[in-house]
Image (tube, rainbow, N blue to C red):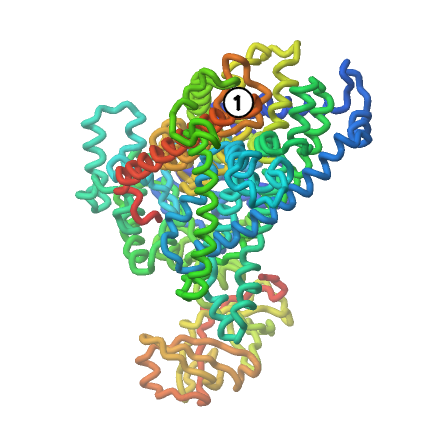
């Protein structure tokens, strides 16, 4: 195992009585793309500002490439940064913006110009060097900010919600662009975002944060399919969370139905929360050919184009409500109508249990 | 185990910025805090410097001739304030909420008094209503020398100050409120009182206190047209310049400080409320034409404008008439000053120098200072302290500052004593006197820039001063120009602080107006006052031209400010 490029140990940041970061530990490897994901106020921005030295932590250490940078001012660290607001220098042309960090290094003019030209090509704006930032679209400005940060070839790239000021289409397009740029350059990158879709589609690993603590670190697949806590389960994607009781024989009782699932760690009789993703519920219609099935009524149908949202209740579910995602094609085959009873199959491996005493908020 | 607390290491930027901030704090302490503190001390000392507690205050209040000034100052200022606010509200209402023609022209006319020292209106009043006045009969036998003159003169020169504040309050309105009021069947009068007046109430309160403070601390108008009528501000002058009673001067100064400090806090409170009362979802209100109302308002605005022009015109004419009122043929001889007592072209030259120095050094200190206060990443307590220091001048009347400077810089043991009686002390006093508004202007401009410029700059390993010079300063240039012109015009027109501080070789044009008028050379006094007006107007025009040129030059990157 190689030593991590960025080692964050016991990082704590307090503002008076308020603890913004509580004993955070993360290892980030060279060339990795890591997203800090969480709701606003979770501490992700504070963590980024501690890593950059813009707001230094109260306790704990940050090591970059084997060097302890915990207490260094930003100018003594090795990183490039892109902000949500872009923070482009509006009175300088695009080319001067990109050259800004290079001009201070006493490089020959021709070398600077060459580098600026390369970067403009890299971001797909080869002819915009003479323009001012205000003459560019939001997405173009964001790419210029990226080029400016990359110009000095930093070892670490920090992206502070870089896409959230853009409209949806541009955002999706820039996601791919930033990701492919990052892969091509192999630069270690940290991006903070509150958009789970963005994190899932871009990151090699995601750090989910809440109230200044890390809830889970993992690949997008791990985070999505094996959420480590109720918070992660709820925060990432859509999730049904139903109160249930652990009974014997590796089963839980949900309403009047008994379902098999992994029950390790729970005593028989314990109250639990069963987490099931809507797309993991299989509708079998009138037929009931599966184990791990239950019967319920369709309360409501919402057509979303490629799929339907089903709102299910009654039957074996009783008072509980379940949302399921049903592909449109399958719905056509089943000829679904409201208030019809039907059978649902929930594969055991797609049911995850969480303690029901977990308070969330 | 508890990890040890991280002690951030400071880089070159942090040292330089923190150091700069410290220098600024010391500068403000020396030119502001220490003089004021010394004056507080003087008010509880006798002439020999021994501590006497509140004896001076007791003495002041038991002396009827002195304490009468308190009552006089209060009621005259209250009356002048009421009239000014009434007129300014009507004027601002017409400019912002009606469809009268020539709005730009009327706005311009209303701003003219800003170009003149407050003395000018008083001199014009003497010509209009004095013993040989053109319109003496209008006063029905009353004398202009006394409260009447002080009130009219004060209304003239404080009018634009009130207008600016009230206009700002009326400029932004939420059209949805008017639609709601109308659709609920409210009468126009009710809409006016419930929506318009309450929407502008913070502006009105703020203007009320500002004008009251301006009047009660003003010295020029009561000096020229006050006659035997005692006011606090003229009292200080008499105590200090006339009787050399510095302790009593300090006592009166403290009394003057009270309304000014109160006004300061009310102003800040009102400004915060004003901003928050307009939500971002508001729909801008556009006045609709209503012929009867518009015509009435046009008449009112025209009348006010006419009075302003009349007073200015009177001063201009007085400066040109050969021998008022006997020989009204025109001459430039009053602009010669060689025969006048108390003024000369040299004082005009001194004023220009003072205004230039103040504009250049003042904008430099203020802008760099505001930058350090806003952008320094370290030394938070020092930033807050410096910002608070920068706000003090707003609450300190010029006369009080001037007197405080005497105490501080003329103290025998002070190593800065060499500044006393030089041009430098006048520049320092004027910068200090007008620091707050300039500081706030600079802060506003800096706050409009992206807050992460400095972070980006640090990430790019570029020293902060380079970004300050290449990005921050060019982007704030319009605001810097505004600050410079503000300093220049105020340095040209101010009397209050500098009247205690000038020396024979640093006499100033504005003080010369005062002294010539005092010596009976009223026509040359009017001439000098008009010179100040012409100079201020010329510089204003230059500023407008420069700003326009700058805007055109930088249009490429200023368009669609996002």
The image shows residue B199, relative to residue B208, as above or below, that is: below
Circle 1 residues within 10 Å: few <14, some 14–19, many ≥20: many
A114 left or right of B138 in image: left
Report the front residue among B149 and B408.
Answer: B149
- Coordinates of residue B237 in the picture (x, y in percent): 65, 25
Read off the chain for label 1.
B
Give the farthest residue toward the front. B326
Report the front residue among A144 and B58.
Answer: B58
* Quarter containing the N terminus of chain B: top right
- Coordinates of residue B172 in the picture (x, y in percent): 46, 55
The structure residue drawn at horizontal position 35% and vertical position 82%, both measured from the top left corner, is A331
Can residue B10 be seen? no
Report the front residue among B419 and A319.
Answer: B419
- Coordinates of residue B288 in the picture (x, y in percent): 40, 65
Can residue A45 be seen? yes
Q: Quadrant of residue B349?
A: top left
B262 left or right of B440 in image: right
The structure residue drawn at horizontal position 44% and vertical position 66%, both measured from the top left corner, is B292
Report the front residue among B505 and B261.
Answer: B505
The residue beneath circle 1 is B516
Q: Quadrant of residue B334?
A: top left
Q: How many numbered circles does the render carry? A: 1
Q: Secondary structure at mark 1?
A: helix
- Coordinates of residue B160 in the picture (x, y in percent): 49, 43
């Amino acid at each position: 195992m190689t030593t991590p490029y960025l080692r964050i140990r016991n990082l704590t940041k307090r503002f008076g009585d308020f603890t913004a970061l509580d004993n955070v530990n993360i290892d980030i490897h060279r060339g990795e793309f890591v997203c800090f994901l969480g709701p606003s106020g979770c501490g992700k921005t504070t963590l980024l500002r501690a890593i950059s030295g813009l707001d230094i932590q109260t306790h704990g250490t940050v090591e970059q490439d084997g060097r302890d940078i915990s207490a260094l001012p930003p100018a003594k660290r090795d990183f490039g940064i892109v902000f949500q607001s872009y923070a482009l220098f509006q009175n300088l042309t695009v080319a001067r913006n990109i050259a800004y960090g290079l001009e201070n290094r006493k490089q020959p003019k021709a070398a600077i110009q060459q580098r600026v030209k390369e970067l403009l090509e890299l971001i797909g704006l080869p002819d915009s060097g003479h323009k001012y930032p205000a003459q560019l679209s939001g997405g173009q400005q964001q790419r210029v900010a990226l080029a400016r940060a990359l110009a000095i070839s930093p070892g670490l790239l920090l992206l502070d919600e870089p896409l959230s000021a853009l409209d949806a289409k541009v955002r999706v397009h820039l996601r791919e662009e930033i990701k492919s740029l990052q892969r091509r350059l192999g630069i270690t990158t940290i991006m903070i975002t509150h958009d789970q879709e963005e994190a899932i589609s871009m990151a090699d690993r995601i750090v989910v944060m809440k109230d200044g603590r890390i809830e889970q670190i993992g690949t997008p697949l791990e985070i999505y399919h094996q959420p480590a806590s109720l918070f992660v389960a709820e925060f990432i994607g859509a999730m049904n969370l139903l109160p249930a009781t652990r009974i014997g024989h590796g089963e839980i009782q949900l309403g009047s139905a008994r379902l098999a699932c992994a029950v390790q760690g729970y005593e028989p009789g314990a109250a639990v929360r069963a987490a099931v993703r809507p797309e993991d519920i299989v509708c079998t219609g009138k037929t009931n050919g599966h184990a791990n099935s239950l019967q319920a009524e369709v309360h409501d149908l919402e057509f979303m184009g490629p799929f339907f949202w089903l709102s299910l209740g009654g039957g074996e579910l009783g008072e509980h409500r379940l949302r399921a995602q049903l592909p449109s094609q399958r719905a056509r085959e089943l000829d679904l109508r409201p208030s019809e009873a039907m059978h649902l199959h929930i594969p055991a491996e797609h049911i995850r249990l969480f303690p029901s005493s977990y308070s969330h908020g | 185990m508890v990890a040890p607390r991280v002690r951030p290491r400071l880089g070159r930027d942090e040292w330089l910025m923190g150091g700069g901030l410290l220098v600024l704090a010391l500068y403000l302490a020396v030119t502001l805090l220490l003089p004021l503190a010394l004056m507080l001390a003087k008010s509880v000392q006798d002439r020999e410097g021994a501590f006497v507690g509140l004896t001076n205050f007791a003495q002041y209040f038991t002396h009827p001739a002195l304490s009468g000034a308190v009552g006089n100052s209060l009621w005259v200022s209250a009356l002048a304030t009421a009239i000014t606010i009434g007129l300014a509200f009507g004027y601002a209402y017409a400019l912002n909420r009606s469809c009268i023609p020539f709005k730009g022209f009327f706005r311009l006319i209303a701003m003219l008094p800003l170009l003149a020292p407050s003395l000018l209106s008083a001199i014009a009043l003497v010509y209009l209503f004095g013993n040989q006045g053109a319109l003496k009969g209008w006063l029905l036998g009353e004398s202009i020398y006394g409260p009447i003159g002080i009130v009219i003169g004060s209304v003239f020169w404080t009018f634009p100050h009130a207008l600016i504040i009230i206009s700002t309050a009326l400029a932004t309105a939420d059209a949805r409120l008017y639609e709601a009021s109308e659709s609920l069947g409210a009468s126009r009068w009710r809409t006016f009182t419930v929506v318009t007046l309450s929407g502008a109430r913070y502006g009105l309160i703020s203007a009320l206190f500002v004008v009251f403070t301006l009047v009660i601390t003003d010295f020029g108008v009561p000096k020229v047209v006050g006659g035997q009528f005692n006011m606090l501000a003229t009292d200080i002058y008499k105590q200090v310049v006339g009787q050399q009673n510095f302790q009593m001067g300090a006592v009166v100064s403290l009394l003057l400080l009270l309304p000014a400090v109160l006004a300061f806090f009310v102003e800040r409170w009102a400004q915060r409320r004003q901003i928050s009362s307009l939500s971002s979802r508001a729909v801008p209100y556009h006045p609709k034409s209503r012929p009867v109302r518009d015509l009435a308002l046009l008449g009112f605005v025209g009348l006010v404008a006419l009075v302003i022009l009349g007073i200015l015109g009177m001063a201009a004419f007085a400066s040109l008439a050969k021998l008022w009122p006997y020989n009204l043929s025109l001459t430039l001889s009053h602009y010669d000053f060689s025969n006048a007592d108390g003024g000369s072209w040299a004082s005009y030259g001194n004023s220009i120098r003072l205004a230039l120095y103040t504009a250049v050094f003042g904008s430099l200190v203020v802008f760099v200072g505001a930058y350090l206060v806003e952008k320094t990443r370290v030394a938070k307590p020092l930033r807050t302290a410096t910002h608070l220091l920068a706000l003090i001048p707003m609450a300190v009347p010029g006369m009080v500052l001037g007197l405080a400077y005497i105490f501080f810089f003329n103290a025998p043991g002070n190593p800065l004593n060499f500044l006393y009686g030089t041009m430098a002390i006048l520049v320092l006093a004027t910068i200090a006197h007008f620091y707050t508004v300039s500081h706030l202007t600079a802060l506003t401009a800096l706050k409009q820039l992206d807050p992460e410029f400095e972070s980006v700059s640090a990430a790019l390993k570029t020293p902060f001063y380079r970004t300050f010079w290449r990005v921050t300063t060019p982007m704030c240039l319009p605001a810097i120009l505004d600050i410079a012109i503000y300093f220049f015009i105020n340095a040209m027109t101010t009397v209050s602080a500098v009247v205690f501080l000038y020396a024979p070789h640093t006499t100033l044009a504005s003080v010369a107006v005062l002294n010539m008028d005092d010596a009976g050379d009223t026509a040359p006094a009017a001439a000098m006052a008009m010179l100040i007006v012409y100079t201020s107007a010329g510089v204003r025009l230059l500023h407008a031209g420069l700003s326009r040129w700058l805007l055109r030059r930088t249009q490429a990157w200023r368009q669609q400010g996002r």
